[in-house]
Amino acid sequence: MSNVPLVRRAIAGASFAHTSTSIEVPSMNPVGDHWTPAALERAGSTLKALHRMAKRPPVHIIFEDVGYTVNASEGERTILHNVSGEFRSGELTCILGPSGAGKSTLLNILAGSTGVNGRITVNGQARDMRVFKKLSSYIMQDDILQPRLTVSESLKIAADLKLGSELGKAEKELVVEEILQTLGLWDHRDTMSQSLSGGQSKRLSIALELVNNPPIIFLDEPTTGLDIVSIRQLVVLLRLLSRQGRTIICTIHQPSASLFSLFDRVYVLSRGLCCYQGAAPLLVPYLAEVGHVCPKTHNPADFVLETLVGNVETAAQMSELCQNGKLCRTINKMIRDGRKRELHSYESIQRIFTEHVAKEQLQKMNFPTSFMTQFLILIKRMFLQMRRNSLNLWIQLFHHIIGALLMGGIFFLIGNDGNQPIANFKFCLSCVVFFMYTYIMIPILLFPTELRTLRREYFNRWYSLKAYYAALTLSTMPLLILLGTLFIAICYTMSGQILEFKRFVLFTITGLLTGICSEGFGLLVGSTFNATNGSIVGPATVAPLLALCCYGLGFGSHIEAFMKFLMSLSYLRYSLSGFCLALYQVK
Ligand SMILES: Nc1ncnc2c1ncn2[C@@H]1O[C@H](COP(=O)(O)OP(=O)(O)OP(=O)(O)O)[C@@H](O)[C@H]1O
């Protein structure tokens, strides 16, 4: 990291544009060491460097009378009752409240969920989701990282996808280095994501979204599953990032007293009502105003939650006092800091995105990179992960070899025996069943896990679904072709079929096409159901297709029109015909 200058004073003020008196300088750095001179220099320099890279304008969100209703089994249910509030750039805000209060719902709405009443403005202008999506990142509670990529590989791929041609290769590498340093992941840059600890994984999730330097970051329960030390490290890190002008909003469960004081702004929700909004130190006096005096030795965060859970009336009372979020309690110093001076107008944000791109182009350009670039990066990532999952490859290889040997053994040399056409037909049917079940079950079992990563990356506009689907389908193709051909080569020869090149190729193509169609069907099931339900729904759905594929054998031409229609829906029927024609069609 010789290319990153050491600027000690950055931590003390230069890069902390919004430091206010109520907030102390954190006592630990993001990697958990005490603030030794070296750590100060390292954090200061990288923050400054990140700041230099930060070309995004600060963003200030105001929401007014936001209501959200869902259709539940018991009828319409209001989750948010016309709440208001504001989140400012340069501040770390936490949304606090008892379980079921509506915290995640509010966060999702602010991040872009639709079907909401009320008004949301960004820097004083009505929010344009097209622009807002490019400004914000959402880090989910149960983020799944790419398990078989190292930390730096994951970040490089994120940089390639999210920065596109905005920066050159060398600059992207510098950005990756800086982020790794800032987030305390430099020493773990060559560690596989699956081997990271909970805190490190969370930091990597943040690092991945920091690559394109979004001015707004939403985090849903970022501290869940972490120990107290990791939680503190994470919150300190979020605070440091907010100091560079970012708007950081997170939901959180019961922060400790010391952690609570690290937040600049607290937004308390209960029963879908805003009960308090403002500076963390002003919460205790506010509670006293409504008759709930927090004992000196008590954690204010615990106290407010206990008060709200234990007393149904209190939520309404507190909500009335703060006008359901319209009134905000701030410390004078925070206002005096003059956040206005660096708040760009919303038009200026739009200008940043439109200055190089014509408006019509912008409408089409939903993603930072072209379809082809996304496809190439994704397919490379998929191949790399596949290559590293050698156990999976061995299992699939053995499955195909053992399956082929069994099939060849059962139907040994029946292909050349003119007395056994039915046995040969059964051989073809067995091949249909093998390709169908093998390739349906792989995506049903594996895709639900992958789907969580896909949701995060797609929601954060890394790539289009078209590019992902194309890469996913093509990435499995080489293995399918290789293993499918190996399977057919073994059982075709063992079962004594006619050794003609054309017949063998047609037989193989039929098997491979069956596998491809089954994989597509498996993806449909895998993206709709979880692995448990999918492994019931998948086989249960293809069983009728299998029955339809041999229905009508020996009926002659007397098949009802309706059954003919149903039979035509079974892709397995075409597979069976394909196998039989390859073996029996006279040239
Ligand atoms: N689509 C939906 N249908 C029915 N109820 C819903 C729906 N979405 C959310 N809810 C309900 O709305 C309430 C608020 O949910 P939300 O996930 O926002 O709570 P939360 O404050 O984040 O809770 P927790 O801290 O436990 O995660 C909950 O009672 C939840 O059951």
Image: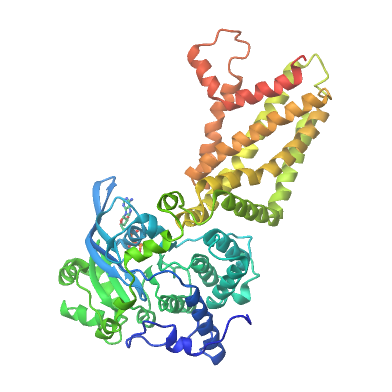
Quarter of the image that includes the C terminus: top right
Relative depth, front residue between 360 and 395 = 360
Q: Is 540 drawn above or below residue 152 in the view shown?
A: above
110 on left or right of 371: left
545 on left or right of 485: left
Relative depth, front residue between 450 and 309 = 450
Relative depth, front residue between 277 and 16 = 16
* Residue 550 visible: yes
Provide residue 545's location: percent of width, then percent of height. 56, 27
Q: Residue furthest bottom?
A: 37
Q: Is 519 drawn above or below residue 552 in the view shown?
A: below
496 on left or right of 103: right
Colour mapping used in the image? rainbow
* Residue 30 visible: no
Residue sitting at x 27%, y 53%? 116
Q: Is 76 drawn above or below residue 513 in the view shown?
A: below
Provide residue 398's location: percent of width, then percent of height. 75, 44
Q: Which quadrant of the structure image shows residue 195?
A: bottom right
Q: Which quadrant of the structure image shows residue 340?
A: bottom left
Relative depth, front residue between 50 and 169 = 169
Quarter of the image that includes the N terminus: bottom right
Looking at the rendering, the quadrant in which ligand 1 lies is bottom left
Residue sitting at x 37%, y 81%? 262
Provide residue 146's location: percent of width, then percent of height. 58, 59
Q: Is 472 drawn above or below residue 187 in the view shown?
A: above
Q: Which quadrant of the structure image shows residue 130?
A: bottom left
